[in-house]
Each structure stands twice: as C-alpha cells, then as structure tokens.
Image: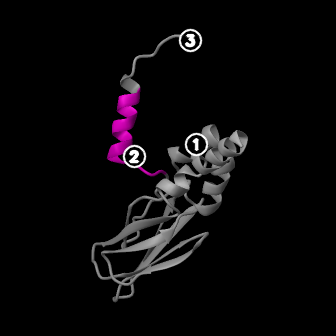
Amino acid sequence: MNKLFVVSALVGLSACASVTVGSEQLIAVKTTPVEGSRCELKNPKGTWVVERTPGTATVNKARGEMVVTCSNPNGKTASRRAQSDSKAEAFGNILIGGGIGAVADMSTGAAYLYPSEIVVDLNGNNPPILAVPDTEEEKARKAEEANKPQYPK
C-alpha cells in the first residue's frame, strides 16, 4: 500500500510543468512601422491567426520554431522566426519523477516557451529570436540562488 502511494505521488509530482505552466501560451504580436496587419503564427503543433495587430493569440507550445508571417492591407508581407526555449520546470521533472514528467512535458509542449511578444518589421528587418529572455521572476530567483552561501560537501 505504501509503495503504491509513493509511486502515485512521484507520478503526480513528475508532471510539474504540465500542471504549473500548461501546454498553451499567450503571444502578443505587433507590427512596425504600421499596425493593422493580419498575422499567422505557425509551429509544429498548428497555425493561429491574429486578425489585426496589435493583437494576441493563444498557441500550443512546441519544441522548435514559431514562424510569424504578417501582411498589411497595402500588400507588404514579412516574417519573423522565434525559437522555443526549455524552461527550468522541465528539468525539475527529471529529478523528481525520474524523467516520466519530463517526457510528458516535452510531448505536450509544457517544457517549452516562446517569447511573450513578437514584433514583425514589415520593412524586413527581422532577425530570428534565438532565446527567450528571463522573466522578472526568473531573474529574481537566479539572483537569490547566486547569493546563497555555498558550503563544502
């Protein structure tokens, strides 16, 4: 009975990122130098549309690239690529659940994160976004971790 409880607890805890951050993400899309463009967001999990910029779309997170292609009413079209990034919650699953949760999070997309805002320059100056910047909470957590005293083992 106790073994069953322990195994159930580990399996439950191993899905941390799926439970805490989910497999969907809200992304804001803007265009420059003019607004009012229609944008299509594509990744390995599907396609979503922002009918008019600035606007938002809730996408399914995935490993790999998100391509955002925008067209304005004057006929200008441009694209920008954003790479997803693995988040810390996914690595916690490896420690807690022996990898079961990490596999679940990777397959659902919960282990990944895109930038929360993507700006597409309709004049074509759109370098790829290679990494997701840390959120303010992540920056604070990393600073706190760095300031903890280190004790020899």
Could you tell me how far apart the alpha carbons at marks 3 and 2 are, in whole angstroms? 30 Å
Point out the tag, 3 or 2, that comes first from the N-terminus.
Answer: 2
Point out the tag, 1 or 2, that comes first from the N-terminus.
Answer: 1
Give the magenta range: 131-145
Could you tell me how far apart the alpha carbons at marks 1 and 3 are, in whole angstroms? 23 Å
Q: What secondary structure is the stretch in magenta mostly built from? A: helix
Q: Are marks 3 and 2 in contact (CB under 8 Å)?
A: no
Residue 48 is situated, as x and y percent measured from the top left of the image, at 49, 78
Query: Where 25 falls versus 46 (above or below)?
Result: above
Residue at image position (39%, 42%) is: 138
Local SS, label 3? loop
Q: Which mark is residue 152?
A: none
Residue at image position (56%, 41%) is: 92
Residue 113 is situated, as x and y percent measured from the top left of the image, at 49, 56
Point out the tag, 1 or 3, that comes first from the N-terminus.
Answer: 1
Residue at image position (61%, 39%) is: 96
Q: Judge the density around disc 3: few (<14), some (14-19), many (≥20) Cα neighbours within 10 Å.
A: few
Judging by the rendered image, the residue that carries numbered circle 2 is 134
Local SS, label 2? loop
Quadrant assignment for the C terminus = top right
Judging by the rendered image, the residue that carries numbered circle 1 is 91
Residue 141 is situated, as x and y percent measured from the top left of the image, at 38, 36
Name the kind of residue labelled 2 in the image. Asp
Judge whether residue 53 can be spotted in this image.
yes
Residue 40 is situated, as x and y percent measured from the top left of the image, at 47, 78
Judge whether residue 98 can be spotted in this image.
no
Query: Where 8 falls versus 67 (above or below)?
Result: above
Judging by the rendered image, the residue that carries numbered circle 3 is 153
Which mark is in front, 3 or 2?
A: 3
Local SS, label 1? helix
